[in-house]
Amino acid sequence: MSTPPTQANDPGIAGRRIRIVGSGPLARTFADDLTGYGAELVDSGPGTPIRDLDALVFAPWDPAIMKPVAMADLGDDEFDEAWQQTMDTAVAACIDARSSFRNGRGCIVLTFPTTAFAGGAGYAHWAAAAEGVHVLAKSAARQWGPDGIAVNSLAVAPELVLADPVAAGPVSIATPARPEASAGPVLAFLCSEAAHNLAGQALTVDGGSWM
Amino acid sequence: MDVNTNPSQRLAGRVAIVTGAGQGVGEGIARKLAAEGASVVIAARRAATGEPVAQAIRDFGGVAECIVTDVTTRASIEECVALTVAHHGGLDVMVHNAFAGGVASRLEETPPDAWFQMSYTSAWAGFWCAQAAFPHLDASDAGRLILVTSPSGVEGSANIPLYSPAKAAQRAMAKSLAREWGPHGITVNCIAPVAETPALAGAFAQVPTLRGAIEARTPLGRIGDPVSDIGGVVAFLAGPDAGYVSGQTIVCDGGSFLGL
């Protein structure tokens, strides 16, 4: 849930034009969070490229499709959906955003589950995609940073996106620090002008499980 | 390449496949595993490169054969594994090293063919190698899957931006399979090497200052030898001393990358 902005917690994204890639629960939550801070959500249509974009949020992760499959049973279609389509979509979204940014300057936030860091039993295909997206943010940050594009990433708890996070296994052997944490304010920061002080960073908002 | 002439034979009786073993890092790994007593299958895209490596190992007294393998197709990998088991009686160690497609470019100008080649030789081939090898690694008393990633797969690359995610996939798959296959007694690990290879030599030819730059940023002051520096680490991971190591990445680059 978003927190109504006050002078103290306003991330300064009111009026910023943000595109969210994804339609699952995570993307919808992020949409609520960002509009709660006054951002304007935009999307492209056939033949109508986005103009004056300020930020891109990549959040396609959806428990409806992120199901565990043992490696022995994993089919090419499932690997294609997880790895290839996710990476292709991420790369295309980044390139589209780059050409749509207001005066060439903007923020890209690639989200992914911490399964990228920790792996997951039955989740080799989705973990590969998650870590691929994580490292894509680093490459893009290194190459596009000099152009005025801030590329960073946001790691979220597997419980938000995996169909069976218990099957995947624990992210950490240690006790989570702060289970009630919300990713919305951090996402808003990464979409703000202040995010230009970061490059290629992964901010993990999972309640302090992965450290 | 410097071949150990007094091997420990700690891999005697073990059967290994090394993809991309016709040259470079893969050749170094294959030579080292053979020197340590393993029967090694040189899974190379071309017999012209793979067969000389196998012959060199045989000349040295080792056991090796070349099986021509295109890692961009599932059927070719499955055939390689099936032939290996038929010829050598099993499979204990699968090393996926083959890679192609890395071309310096802007992200927005990366040729689609180059991206798909990187994706298929890294992520897809890692998937297919793992799946084809699994029943045999499971039957082994100490199955090992070893995937070759890169320091760039951790820290990203401004020169070949999609090389990094393609290599990053290996690390996440290794961690996932370490969890999944642990109950089967199989370990899954990665190495991230920097070594003297034909690919690196080609880069040096294009950028004459590159060798000096790499050596200058490397605490050990040199670029790794594929046999002794890289192959030795894989031999450790494949051998009995690494039976309690799984889901890890060992960076073999002279201490240059310290981000793990």
Image: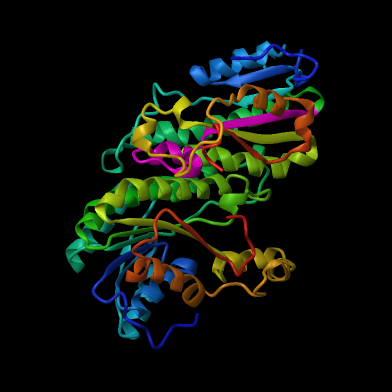
Q: Can residue B239 be seen in this view?
A: yes
- Vertical position of residue B110 compared to residue A37: above or below: below
Residue drawn at x 67%, y 17% as measured from the top left: A49
The magenta segment is: A104-128
Q: Which residue is drawn at 31% across and 42% down?
A: A71
The percent position of residue B232, horizontal first and vertical second, equals 44, 73
Could you tell me residue B171's position as x and y percent? Answer: 47, 50
Count of numbered circles on the image: 0
Residue name at image x 51 percent, y 50 percent:
B167
Image height of B147 relative to A48, above or below: below
In the figure, is residue B79 to the left or right of A190? left
Q: In this view, does B181 lie above or below B3?
A: above
Specify the quadrant of the image occupied by residue A198. top right
Residue at the far bottom: name it: B6
Q: Give x and y (percent) for residue B60.
A: 35, 85
Image coordinates of residue B189 in percent, x first then y, are: 41, 57
Instruction: Report whether residue A44 is seen.
Output: no
Colour logic: rainbow
Front residue (pair B172, A10): A10
B199 is within the stretch colored magenta: no
Check the picture and name the quadrant holding the C terminus of chain B. bottom right
Q: Is residue A111 found inside the magenta-colored segment of the image? A: yes
Which is more toward the observer, A204 or A191? A204
Query: Residue A81: which quarter of the image?
Result: top left
B33 and B58: which one is in front?
B33
